[in-house]
């Protein structure tokens, strides 16, 4: 093992990076890690901060990058890295799902860095020592960076307590105190685990070890989190700031307990806040995009080449500060930094070579290692490959998501609503839950929707708006309303999803129960936060008692689930509406006939007439009708029903014309955009030459009588 002394002359650097998603360079623009290494041709590849750091080292005349290997792995934690550096077969096999997850990403045909890990791990066989290469490379290294701790916390946070606190309206101070205690316990455990890991790492290498801080995750979401959690007034810190501060503090504490381990803070908070849009281009990403990783590498290399005295002297130049520095305190707070690289250059020259003529110049300039990967820098949001592999293989971690969904406000109400209880039982099967979530991400449709949603939010941010909960919701709703085909593209993934096809009876049962809940309970009001008017409630109660309506509901479910593959080929909800009516016209007419006959049979006639009169009086204020007038009104309505019953040919022609009219309605706009339905239901449109006599003398005359009664008794 070659030891790299602090004050040594130029050395050949053997650099190994280890850690999690942050140091793996996970980038949601293309959806994969971008670890990187020094190739046999001598090129540095990759788009994570270790690759940019390795490139900076390689470009120095005073240093030589002999080797560079980035073994960082997405979702990995301290326990996993304990297993790797010890090459502990038993521990690795007990965490095989993590290796399966990394392997699935590594072999994915869409991965621009496909087979990166396979080039090291060969057959991925633990018992054949295929992973021993990690500890061997670490032993050979003389410079190591470590980024660990985030996943140890994110998958162990007290999410249930968070939910309870939010639902309490942020009023339970005791609840927040309990949360803080829980977090403090987690951070203390992390410090201990990291210390033990660093001790093991130090036992197998004499290399310079640098423990790298994290930058702020979910950087766009401050105002949203502020609406749920308290702000630390004395520091004006959000819950994410608190989390990040405690996390980096744990790393710092752990580094102090081990000899020759260097902690470096790379979180230039003010700079990140002021330049968020090019450092972290994707709102819905925990980690930054390539420019953010480049910033981390620039800061890290600068802090490892300049000591506090050199920086203090440098910052006496006000012009330099104006061009290059936004937060002097960030650069001078180097209590644990130790200079590792000696460059025979003046401090200002070093700084300018790294950052350029100003603080943003080289960050925005495409570097050598980016040229070959320029296509990957195109704006986009790709999350499917990661999520698909994560859900399938990362069993322990994905359970957090599944349990979180099952404990959501909807499924906690399952005792009140039978349909939600069926959903809960369905998702309780881990395989069903995984396949269900994955189905939404198939074919990149949800990615496209989310990317456009993100662009809408960014446009609003550029107009000076804050990304608060209201903007978050309103932009989503506006996109759903305005982009019907895109919304349908996401929704229709369920039509040909394997989990739906394999569980048609269960899905049918869920929908059956939901329809029953919709007609007998307030589930629609609960789910969609609707205020249902009394008129709708009366109709809902009335139809819920009709056996034929239940049969109609079952038919709708059957017809959609049976031909779901065909509906998956359509392009919009309106197209689905039109195709469904055309395909099922005669069955619908049959059920309409059956429903009509049920409404006017001897058991239901009086109830049906009462319902009609009740709705008339709710629309038009009438005097209390005397017995004679009331009887006349009831008899007239009953007479219309009997006339229709005696003329089934007219009734069927009317239902047929009604379906043709309804088929022309753009239902999506009517329901979501509240667009009025054009006047297509005029009497003339339901009458042809064959019906003139019947309508005129049997129907229209009686309707005129009803109108007269209403007019005469109107208040």
Image: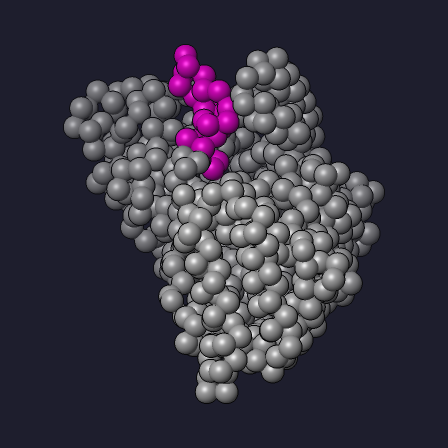
Residue 114 in percent (x, y) is at 57, 62
Q: Residue at x 48, y 30 (%)?
A: 225
Residue 59 in percent (x, y) is at 37, 47
| In magenta segment, residue 228 | yes
Magenta part of the protein: which range?
A: 217-242
Q: Residue at x 16, y 28 (%)?
A: 319
Pick the front one: 527 or 280: 527
Q: Height in image: 281 above or below 564?
A: above
What is the quadrant of residue 510 in the picture? bottom right
Residue 411 in percent (x, y) is at 69, 41
Camera sees residue 135 = no
What is the quadrant of residue 360 in the picture? top left
Q: Height in image: 403 above or below 511?
A: above
Pick the front one: 168 or 7: 168
Camera sees residue 688 = yes
Q: Residue furthest bottom?
A: 690
Tell me the quadrant of the picture where the N terminus can be found.
top right
Residue 268 in percent (x, y) is at 38, 29
Q: Residue at x 46, y 55 (%)?
A: 709
Q: Height in image: 690 above or below 491?
A: below
| In magenta segment, residue 649 | no
Pick the front one: 220 or 5: 220
Q: Height in image: 278 above or below 392?
A: above
Q: Residue at x 82, y 52 (%)?
A: 127
Number of disc labels: 0
């Amino acid at each position: 093992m070659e030891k790299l002394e602090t004050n040594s002359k130029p050395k050949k650097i053997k650099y190994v990076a280890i850690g999690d998603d942050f140091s793996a360079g996970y980038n949601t623009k293309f959806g994969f890690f971008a670890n990187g290494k020094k190739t046999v041709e001598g090129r540095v590849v990759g788009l994570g901060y270790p690759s940019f750091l390795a490139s900076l080292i390689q470009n120095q005349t005073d240093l030589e990058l002999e080797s560079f290997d980035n073994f960082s792995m997405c979702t990995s934690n301290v326990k996993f890295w304990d297993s790797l550096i010890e090459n502990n077969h038993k521990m690795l096999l007990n965490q095989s799902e993590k290796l399966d997850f990394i392997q699935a990403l590594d072999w994915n045909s869409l991965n621009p860095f496909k087979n990166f890990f396979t080039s090291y791990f060969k057959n991925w066989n633990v018992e054949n020592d295929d992973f021993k290469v990690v500890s061997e490379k670490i032993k050979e290294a003389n410079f190591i960076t470590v980024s660990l701790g985030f996943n140890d916390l994110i998958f162990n946070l007290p999410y249930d307590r968070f939910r309870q606190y939010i639902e309490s309206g942020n009023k339970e101070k005791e609840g927040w105190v309990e949360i803080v205690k829980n977090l403090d316990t987690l951070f203390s455990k992390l410090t201990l685990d990291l210390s033990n890991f660093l001790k093991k790492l130090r036992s197998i290498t004499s290399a310079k070890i640098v423990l790298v801080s994290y930058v702020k995750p979910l950087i766009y979401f401050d105002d949203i989190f502020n609406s749920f959690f308290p702000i630390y007034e004395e520091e004006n810190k959000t819950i994410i700031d608190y989390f990040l501060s405690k996390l980096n503090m744990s790393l710092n504490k752990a580094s102090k307990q081990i000899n020759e381990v260097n902690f470096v803070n790379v979180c230039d908070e003010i700079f990140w806040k002021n330049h968020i849009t090019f450092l972290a281009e994707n709102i819905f990403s925990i980690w930054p995009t390539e420019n953010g990783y480049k910033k981390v590498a620039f800061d890290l290399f600068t802090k490892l080449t300049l000591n506090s005295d050199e920086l203090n002297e440098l910052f006496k130049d006000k012009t330099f500060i104006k061009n290059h520095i936004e937060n002097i305190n960030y650069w001078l707070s180097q209590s644990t930094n130790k200079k590792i690289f000696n460059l025979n250059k003046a401090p200002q020259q070093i700084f300018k070579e790294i950052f350029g003529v100003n603080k943003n110049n080289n960050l925005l300039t495409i570097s050598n290692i980016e040229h070959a990967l320029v296509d990957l820098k195109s704006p986009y949001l790709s999350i499917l490959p990661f999520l698909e592999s994560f859900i399938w293989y990362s069993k322990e971690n994905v359970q957090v998501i599944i349990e979180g969904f099952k404990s959501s406000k909807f499924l906690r109400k399952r005792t009140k609503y039978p349909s939600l209880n069926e959903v809960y039982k369905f998702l309780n099967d881990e395989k069903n839950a995984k396949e269900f979530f994955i189905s939404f991400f198939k074919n990149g449709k949800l990615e496209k929707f989310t990317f456009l949603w993100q662009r809408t939010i960014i446009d609003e941010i550029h107009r000076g708006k804050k990304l608060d909960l209201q903007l978050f919701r309103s932009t989503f709703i506006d996109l759903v309303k305005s982009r019907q085909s895109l919304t349908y593209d996401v929704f229709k993934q369920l039509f040909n999803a394997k989990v739906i096809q394999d569980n048609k009876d269960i899905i049918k049962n869920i929908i059956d129960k939901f329809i029953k809940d919709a007609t007998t309970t307030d589930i629609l009001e609960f789910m969609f936060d609707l205020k249902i008017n009394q008129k709708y409630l009366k109709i809902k109660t009335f139809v819920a008692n009709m056996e034929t309506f239940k049969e109609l509901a079952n038919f709708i479910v059957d017809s959609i689930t049976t031909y779901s593959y065909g509906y998956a080929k359509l392009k919009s909800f309106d197209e689905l509406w039109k195709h469904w009516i055309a395909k099922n016209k005669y069955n619908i007419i049959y059920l309409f006939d059956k429903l009509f006959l049920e409404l006017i049979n001897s058991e239901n006639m009086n109830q049906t007439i009462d319902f009609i009169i009740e709705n008339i009086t709710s629309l038009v204020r009438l005097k209390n009708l005397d017995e004679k007038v009331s009887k006349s009104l009831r008899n007239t309505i009953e007479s219309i029903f009997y006339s229709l019953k005696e003329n089934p040919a007219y009734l069927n022609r009317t239902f047929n014309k009604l379906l043709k009219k309804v088929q022309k309605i753009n239902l999506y706009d009517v329901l979501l955009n509240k667009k009025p339905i054009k006047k297509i239901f005029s009497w003339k449109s339901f009458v042809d030459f064959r019906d003139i006599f019947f309508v005129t003398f049997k129907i229209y005359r009686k309707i005129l009588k009803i109108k007269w009664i209403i007019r005469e008794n109107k208040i």
